[in-house]
Amino acid sequence: MIDRDQVLHVARLARLRLSEEEVETMVGELSGILDHVDRIGKLDLEGVEPTSHVVALENVLRADESRPSLPRDVALAPAPEPLDGAFRVPSPQADA
Amino acid sequence: MAGLLDLTVAAAAAKIASGEISAEEYFQAWRGAARGDELNAYLWQVEDGNGYEIEEGPLQGIPVAVKDIFCTEGSPTTAGSRILEGYRPPYTATAVRRLDAAGARVLGKTNMDEFAMGSSNENSAYGPVLNPWDRGRVPGGSSGGSAAAVAGGLAPCALGTDTGGSIRQPASLCGIVGLKPTYGAISRYGMIAFASSLDQCGPLTRDVTDAALMLEALQGRDPLDSTSVGIEGGIVAPSREDLRGLRFGVPGELARDSFEAGVREVFERTLKRIEELGGEIAEVALPSAEHGISAYYVLAPAEASSNLARYDGVRYGMRSASAADLLEMYETTRAEGFGPEVKRRIMLGTYALSSGYYEAYYGQAQKVRTRIAEDFADSFATVDFVVTPTSPSVAFGLGEMTDDPLSMYLNDFFTVPMSLAGIPAISIPAGLAEPEGGGTRLPVGFQIAAPAFAEQKLLEAAYALEQAVGFDARPEGSGG
């Protein structure tokens, strides 16, 4: 159903590093789940409108006015590595 | 002491309002009970609660156990995950604020399946919660800590969230009342997102009256959640004594669905009770409901994979110490911070949304969702409510299903269709049954679903039925 290469590809898309053992487990478990889920793939649902939201709401808007937001220091407080009013992260390139 | 803890929330609030008991004395009694938590129901408890300003209101002085998925300013909020260990949010969820405004006080934050993904509470990064009826069994999930706290006499009432059954199923397995309101009845602001088109919070309580009291405090439109609309006319305490003139639809499909014999027996006995109260039982058809689990386990993981992208080690929560560059930091932080079930669902959701599979999975699941909503709409044209068991079994053993994710998912069989349709549903304890394979008799929940925003009618019917059923069993050794 889903093979090792696909699992590795999806893990990359999801920014998840999987151990060798996790890759093996994931191949088996995801295949089992997808086997079950695939039943809906066989249903004839031609012309059925997809539902993305159950309550009939349209254009819920507020007045376009500026409002106070979280102060910068409060927003930065839970960060693992705040620095000079910003979020510090490792360089995008290891040798940069 | 024991006398105070025996009171329902409605009774305690009335006594506090009249001055018969003091809010402080009541709160401290519950704090004492909560400190005796042997079920791992709490992840955090309030330090002392002294000097806390209590608002006057319908929940004046009532302590509430809050699922750890709600942001509470300044106190730890983990959503049951390692990745949020040590996180103290800079703001409080609207639902918690509304309880505060009604006079309630947070007693503690309750354990849960990581990011609300699970039906047994075994997916918490902080250890499983034990079922107060039998400590070798699960309390259900994902609001397992909230349910165990109320059933085990560690809190008078609790707040939970329900995406596919996460309030109703643990309420059922712990022998208490659990209500999932209509999607949009209560604000989701500050409630850590799992699947945004399905997530809805609601009360877990000892009885239906307390659920109504909490719902009235919680419901309402919130400018901070544009999908919230509230319940028109609000909610009052239910008082109905009979079920005359009401029609209860039993899905014909139940005849061939497999669930425990004990659960079936309690379910059928409850149907008789409905008839004794003057209610009418009719058969309805939910032909698409059998595809509910498949649709749900595409839609919910898909939305989760997007919602959980925010946990990247940059703005809050943990960050892996070992990364050489940015991409590696993302990947290793998420690898170390998420547990196996969360990884599984992120993978499933990412796959379902990936190029070439979107229509086959996500698109198709959204259409099944339409069909299920139509099934309910058709049913409600001829009946007032749809009723089912809440869970196919009584509480199962710890570790019994952890190796088989699919069979765990099938636990949500009876609760997922209502979530997909966005309609309200309540689980009330209807009796005790022996588990398959024997053992102590355990609670069985009865689920009643109603049309969108018909909460008042739903609570009235549940109240009448609750009085007639007279479920008063309590787990041994529970505080109350």
Image (cartoon, grey):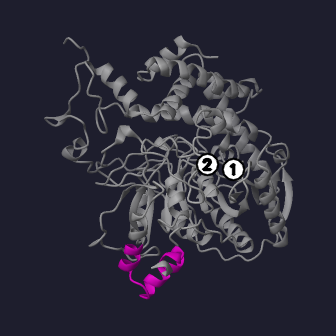
Q: Is disc 2 placed on a helix, strand or loop?
A: loop
Q: Please, what is the dominant secondary structure of the magenta stretch? A: helix
**Mark 2 — on which chain does it sit?**
B
Q: Is disc 1 placed on a helix, strand or loop?
A: loop
Q: Answer left or right for B435 relative to B50.
A: right
Residue B12 forms part of the magenta stretch: yes
Task: Name the kind of residue labelled 2 in the image.
Answer: Gly
Image: magenta residue range: B4-29
- At a point 42% along the width and 33% down the height, the residue shown is B338
**Mark 1 — on which chain does it sit?**
B
For label 1, the residue is B391
Farthest residue in the left direction? A84
Q: Is residue B410 above or below residue A27?
A: below
Residue B234 visible in the current orientation: no
- At a point 49% along the width and 78% down the height, the residue shown is B2
Q: Nearer the viewer, residue B431 or A74?
A: B431
For label 2, the residue is B165
